[in-house]
Amino acid sequence: MNSKRAIGVFGLLMSFVLLIGACVAPSAAPSTTSTTTETTAVTETTTTTDTAAAPAAAGAFKIGLVTDVGRVNDRSFNQSAWEGVQQFGAANGLKEGDDYKYIETKDAKDYAENIQQFVDNGFNVIVTVGFAIGDATAKAAAANPDINFIGVDQFQAAEVANVAGLIFHEDQSGFLAGALAAHLSKSGTIGAVLGTDSVPPVVRFKEGYEAGAKYINKDIKIISVYNPKDISQAFNDPEWGAATAKQTIDQGADVIFGAGGNTGNGALQEVAGHAGLYCIGVDSDQWETVPAAHPCLVSSAMKLITPGVQDLLTLAKDGKFKGGNVFGGAGLAPFHDFDAKIPADVKADLEKIDAGLKDGSIETGVK
């Protein structure tokens, strides 16, 4: 089977143990660059920030972040982006709440208004999180060419000088997760509990996962279920995630991939209550963010969002910001407490697959 060349860090991560991602590829892809920052562990943030954005002081470097629908401490996607801002701020002597802050989006109709708050108050860089906020980001960037925008998971069909799309090869980290799941499954049935299929990166995770599993076992049974609700609810529905995981387990699945923010977290926590089963997280190393899943969490299909955001903020601060697409790293997180339970031949096979994804000798088949 074949896959796209990845610009990832899995080789580095596997030498570590294993580490991490992106939008739909168009018919004519624009120029891309890549980030190569080392990953840092994701930890849950409990910081709160006023909704209103305060005006920027003269000479200040101000960063605003607008979340996708959901909470900034979702232990997954939004949180990873915010931690990139936090870590950049701490490294550059900036003050949280004054020099950098976030606005949580409660409803998708508020995307533009939330971005505009930072525009009106003179922020230098605005980070927007998620595919769904991409249109609002593009419109705000066009109207404000002096502000740099970082769109996480937002593919740029045309290069615009002040917009960088931080994107990932989710199909490749998904492929590795699927290969791991197929290696670990004893029942010959695995599952995936997912956010909405209206978000391309989620689809790429799912299709990569299925392709990776079939790469190992062409006869494996895969039960993949998307959340059927509106995008504003699909990623913040842990009860549905848990119930769907339970149904999947009842159908014989012994490894389940949870890929959908808090919805996926609900699935992971459900699997953790069933002895002898495995679960795989998504986006960040969820061992660090969902401790309730430790009994089953063998790894996570990671996107290195945190260091990717940091890198782009550094370029903006140094006056070297460039628009277009920037591929962040992708791969598997460490095995943590399960490391000794993963056979050496499985680890070696995952390393071989990762190398093939990088050099193009293996393709995921995901377009």
Image (spheres, helix red, strand yellow):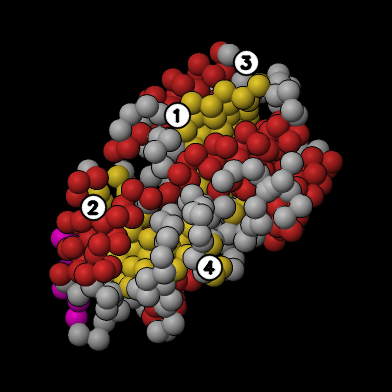
Which mark is nearer the camera, 2 or 3?
2
Q: Amino acid at mark 2?
A: Tyr
* Residue 238 location (% of width, % of height): 39, 30
Q: Amino acid at mark 4?
A: Thr
Drawn side of residue 35 relative to residue 322, left or right: right
Q: Which quadrant holds the N terminus?
A: top right
Residue positioned 69% across, 47% down in the render: 363
Closer to the chain start, of discs 1 and 2, is 2
Q: CA distance from mark 3 to mark 4?
A: 42 Å
Asked if residue 53 lies in the magenta stretch, the reply is yes
Closer to the chain start, of discs 4 and 1, is 4
Which disc is residue 111 wearing? 2
* Residue 319 location (% of width, % of height): 40, 84
Q: Quadrant of residue 271?
A: top right
Closer to the chain start, of discs 2 and 3, is 2
Front residue (pair 16, 12): 12
Residue identifier under label 4: 32
Q: Amino acid at mark 3?
A: Gly
Which mark is nearer the camera, 3 or 1?
1
Closer to the chain start, of discs 4 and 2, is 4
Closer to the chain start, of discs 3 and 1, is 1
Front residue (pair 128, 341): 128
Residue identifier under label 1: 226
Q: Amino acid at mark 1?
A: Tyr
Q: Main secondary structure of the magenta part?
A: loop
Q: What is the span of residues highlighted in magenta in the rendered image?
A: 50-57
Asked if residue 77 lies in the magenta stretch, the reply is no
Residue positioned 65% across, 52% down in the render: 4
Residue identifier under label 3: 252
